[in-house]
């Protein structure tokens, strides 16, 4: 008996069991809430099988992402260039939701937006007043130009009484060539260390706000909605808080499939016609 071969079989069998379990869960779902980076898109390219999975659930899916640099409109155009057709109304983003939350709770608030130009424009469009000093709220998102001077300004505003609203607490996300890209959570760690101020509110996953908005925009039954993502700490944990089913893809602990390509390969049920 080949001992090495016998040792190789259990992992293969477990992998098949995981995929079968993922297929079973997917087959029972009426709607999907899908993560973006690392799940549908990786290294600025659509993941194999992503377009097929979206086509299979056309009209019955929403993207729920901790992205805090884009707007839904801009991201929809970007995804179209990658071959993924996703209407803006089916894209739920942490940055946009943070702006919308603040606009509802504090209309016209003076806000220091630490983030992209797109997020700045969105804040203005929602009736908020972006400022560089004397802010009522600091909105912390992913700022690719974050610097020591920027950190100092943020700390001053917080120590002067401004509240801290955070788009998402992810410390990193997958980037090109397998490199990790520092995320908003990494900036948050610096802000907290320097200011001693804790966030007033964190919007993104695993908090429930994005998932709940995704369910509303789909009109979906939570009992028949499946979350598909790649991060146990955000996707799986967030789904668990709301009692939603979740399938993880990738190489993280607990992943049931290597990628969405394996989910898209779900066998189509065979319809048997009666001979009567």
Image: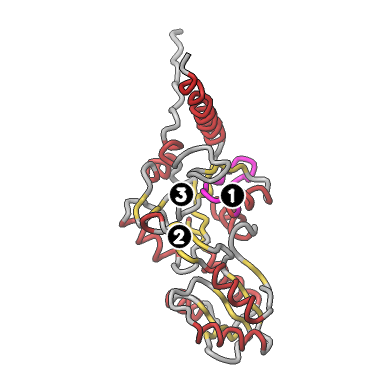
Give above or below for 193 relative to 177. Answer: below
Q: Residue at x 49, y 20 (%)?
A: 3
- Disc number for residue 128: none
Circles 2 and 3 in contact, beta carbons < 8 Å: no
Q: Relative to the observer, which residue lies in front, 140 or 242?
A: 140
Q: Which residues are magenta?
A: 219-233
Task: Look at the numbered disc 3 and give the secondary structure of its residue.
Answer: loop
Q: Relative to the observer, which residue lies in front, 90 or 64?
A: 64
Please state which of the two labelled residues, at mark 1 or mark 2, is closer to the viewer.
Answer: 2
Instruction: Mark 1 or mark 3: name the one nearer the start of the chain.
Output: 3
Local crowd at mark 1 within 10 Å, few (<14), some, or many (≥20)?
some
Give above or below for 119 relative to 15. Answer: below
x then y, percent, for residue 177? 36, 55
Q: CA distance from mark 2 to mark 3?
A: 15 Å
- Disc number for residue 39: 3
* Res 165 quadrant in image: bottom right
Q: Which residue is mark 1?
A: 232
Colour treatment of the image? secondary structure
Give above or below for 49 relative to 234. Answer: above
Q: Residue at x 48, y 59 (%)?
A: 173
Task: Look at the numbered disc 2 and give the secondary structure of its residue.
Answer: strand
Q: Relative to the observer, which residue lies in front, 142 or 251?
A: 251
Local crowd at mark 3 within 10 Å, few (<14), some, or many (≥20)?
many
Local crowd at mark 2 within 10 Å, few (<14), some, or many (≥20)?
few
- Disc number for residue 180: 2
């Amino acid at each position: 008996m080949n001992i090495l071969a016998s040792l190789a079989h259990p992992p293969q069998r477990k992998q098949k069991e995981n995929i079968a379990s993922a297929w079973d869960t997917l087959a029972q779902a009426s709607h999907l809430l899908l993560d973006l980076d690392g799940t549908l898109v990786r290294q600025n390219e659509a993941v194999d099988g992503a377009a097929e999975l979206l086509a299979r659930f056309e009209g019955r899916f929403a993207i729920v992402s901790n992205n805090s640099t884009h707007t839904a409109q801009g991201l929809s155009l970007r995804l179209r260039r990658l071959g993924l057709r996703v209407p803006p109304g089916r894209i739920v983003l942490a940055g946009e939701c943070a702006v919308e939350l603040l606009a509802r709770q504090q209309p016209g608030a003076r806000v220091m937006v630490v983030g992209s130009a797109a997020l700045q424009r969105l804040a203005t469009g929602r009736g908020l007043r972006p400022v560089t000093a004397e802010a009522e709220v600091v909105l912390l998102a992913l700022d690719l130009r974050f610097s020591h001077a920027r950190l100092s300004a943020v700390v001053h505003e917080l120590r002067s009484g401004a509240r801290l609203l955070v788009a998402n607490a992810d410390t990193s996300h997958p980037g090109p060539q397998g490199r990790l890209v520092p995320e908003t959570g990494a900036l948050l760690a610096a802000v907290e260390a320097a200011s001693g101020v804790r966030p007033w509110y964190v919007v993104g996953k695993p908090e429930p706000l994005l998932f709940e908005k995704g369910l509303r925009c789909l009109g979906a039954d939570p009992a028949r909605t499946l979350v598909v993502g790649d991060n146990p700490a955000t996707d799986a944990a967030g789904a668990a808080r709301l009692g939603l089913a979740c399938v993880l893809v990738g190489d993280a602990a607990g992943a049931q499939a290597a990628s969405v390509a394996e989910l898209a390969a779900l066998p189509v049920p065979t319809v048997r016609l009666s001979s009567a």
